[in-house]
Image (tube, rainbow, N blue to C red):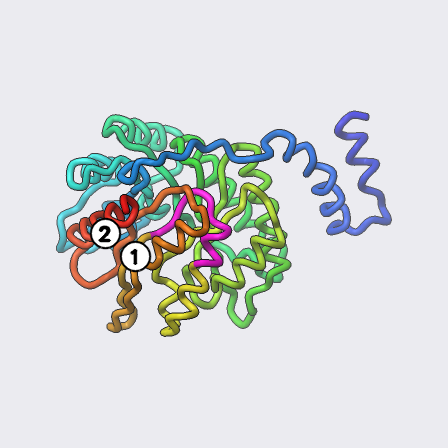
Amino acid sequence: MDRQQCLSYLYNSGMHRRSFLGTALAAAAPRILLAAREPDIAFVTEPRARLGVASYPFRAFIESGHNRDRDKTKPGIDLKDFPAMVRDKYNVRNIEPLDSHFRSLETAYLHSLREAVEKAGCRVINIPVGVRASLYDPDDAKRKVGVDTAKKWVDAAVALGSPSIRVHIQGVRDVKPDVARTADSLRAIAAYGAEKNIVINLENDDPQTEDAFFLVKVLDSVNSPYLHGLPDFCNSMLTGNEKYNYDAVAAMFKRAYNISHVKDSEVDNGKVFRVDVGKTFAIAKQSGYRGYFSMEWEGEGEPYEGTRKLIDASLKYLSA
């Protein structure tokens, strides 16, 4: 039976479109999983080699037409120059560039960016991305925008040699986060990631739409080797509940694979929230986590020195 005959067989005039899509996806799933049952990522063990630096803390400095956080009173730096800065200033060879710091997704630009990364002796270890729509929007067409945008970033990850992307789950006005709809959207994204050997990560970031335990339900529902958690050391502390934060981080590390975000503090509306970095590294170790630790400074002061402090602390605890 050829492809068209197969689709004709699956879809008949009495079958609802959603039923057809579900049947078709179910039929395709075994083929996708056979193509890449597990991510192919080689993990390193040397402490410094496990560290990365995110571009997000440097958002006031990054020159890009998509970067709304650029502060023109500060000296600018192009994303192409970021890898060399990280190497020279911190002796770290892994970077995590934010989507809005890219100038374009055009092939030529991605090629030139990869050249700059490799020339600096660095590599991209993850790309945090927004997908311009909510993955739990009740409107199927709007969710599809999010899925399709995520797929474009999967392709960008392939072009840059990144093993993963982090997909942000944005909200919808007057709509509560929905596990089932979010899981449906992420199944499609993770399936595409599996085809390309790109892992999809979810971060405990926005306290409303990306609560750690909401993400746990989504991750467990999808249950794909290409969909994992991205534990952030401090985001869940913004609730003001210390026990909740460490419980959230532990739950995320149990479902993490290749990337996490290191912070010792975070400033929110003028209030500083702090975490025990050593305790959080112990949680990561206890979970068996083998991936990267990306520095995402969000504390008081400027990011250059703050990032250095995070690197020093990370090396201390990883070498213990």
* Cα–Cα span, label 1 and label 2: 8 Å
Q: Helix, strand or loop at disc 2?
A: helix
Magenta-drawn stretch contains 92 = no
Mark 1 touches mark 2? (CB < 8 Å): yes
Q: Is residue 176 left or right of residue 290?
A: right
Q: Vertically, is 38 above or below 317? A: above
Coordinates of residue 96 in the picture (x, y in percent): 33, 43
Q: Counting residues from the N terminus, which is met first, the one under dot 1 or under dot 2?
A: 1
Give the residue drawn at x 27%, y 63%.
265
The boundaries of the magenta stretch are 250-261
Label 2 crowd bin: few (<14), some (14–19), many (20+), radius 10 Å: some
Nearer to me, 106 or 28? 28
Magenta-drawn stretch contains 251 = yes
Q: Vertically, is 286 above or below 195? A: below
| Residue 131 seen from this side | no
Give the residue drawn at x 23%, y 61%.
299
Q: Which residue is mark 1?
A: 278
The part of the image, by quadrant, that contains residue 94 is: top left
Please state which amino acid type lies under the numbered disc 1.
Gly
Q: Is residue 64 left or right of residue 185?
A: left
Q: Is residue 281 left or right of residue 272?
A: right
Coordinates of residue 289 in the picture (x, y in percent): 43, 46
Q: Quadrant of the N terminus?
A: top right
Coordinates of residue 127 in the picture (x, y in percent): 39, 43
- The mark found on residue 313 in the picture is 2
